[in-house]
Amino acid sequence: MAIKFEKVTHVYSKGTPFEKIALNNINIHIKKGEFVGIIGHTGSGKSTLIQHFNGLLKPTEGTITVLGKKLNDKDTSLKEIRQKVGLVFQYPEHQLFEMTIFKDVAFGPQNMGLSKEEVEARVKEALDMVGIKEDMYEKSPFELSGGQKRRVAIAGVLAMKPEILVLDEPTAGLDPKGRDEILTQIQRLHKTLGITVILVSHSMEDIAKLVDRIIVMHKGKVALNGAPVSVFEHVEELEKMGLAAPQIMYIMKALKEKGLDVSTNILTVEEGAKEIASILKKQK
């Protein structure tokens, strides 16, 4: 098991007039190698939840186990946990600070006390994973496009060789090209490395296309938890939470209502195109 939450509650400013329950009795399990999406409206508890994955926040109540280690045990090294759980915050390019791409990605491995040779090998491997070529190593990170900066920031986390990669809105603020670049790289990382990937996103299309399972947060609780098809069947419930199903599902439903015998359990545009083409072919 990669991550296990048992009756986890987190209260901000407990015992003050500003007290707020951000997480309320959360019970979740995330398996090793699983690709999990977390969705929820602003204020639902998503960001608070993921900051518990590597001990940045401590629960007010409950137990969190990460890679077999209970985070509240005295013998558990949070430094070690944070090396194994790579957390990429929203707009991670704001954390870029070194003079060159290579130096920026090398920062984490160097602080792990690795040899110069091991650091260099990790940096090259991580940059290759995110599609940054060797002729760019000596460029300033600030010369790059938004999508490239995002990929360099992710490489900085990958160079630590995490077993769990947590990405908080990795496509936020990017143009369509940068967005597609990032999503392609994330999908590739999961397939090639086999690591646990947790993706927080507002985009239902991105989530539907990539993940094995979706956890829906609402008012500090887990509202829905299951495979994308089963979660997106609860369209009315999601809409009450300020969310929605992928747009293609609404299109397929409208086509069904117009008399076209299509499946409404379609999650991606590609699946929708194939379904419509198949139906039209049968009608010829």
Image: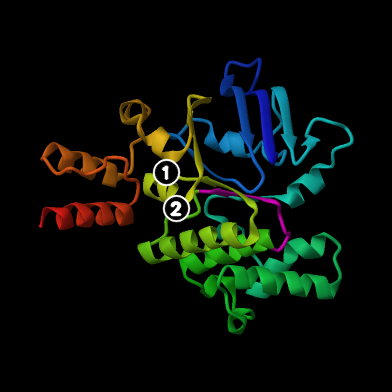
Q: Which mark is residue 202?
A: 1
Query: Would residue 24 be found to the left or right of residue 32 on screen?
Result: left
> Which residue appears at 77% of the width and 63% of the height?
109
Q: Is residue 99 visible?
A: no
> Which residue appears at 60% of the width and 34% of the height?
49
Q: Which residues are magenta?
A: 159-168
Which residue is tagged 2? 172
Q: Is residue 173 above or below residue 106?
A: above
Nearest to the eye among marks 1 and 2: give it: 1
Amino acid type for the residue under numbered disc 2:
Ala
Q: Residue furthest right?
A: 75
**Contact check, label 1 and label 2, Cβ < 8 Å:** yes
Which of the pair 110/260 is nearer the observer?
A: 260
Residue 271 is situated, as x and y percent measured from the top left of the image, at 32, 53
Q: Is residue 101 visible?
A: yes
The local crowd at label 2, few if under 14, some if 14 to 19, many if 20 or more residues have their Cα within 10 Å, is some
| Quadrant in the picture for residue 136 | bottom right
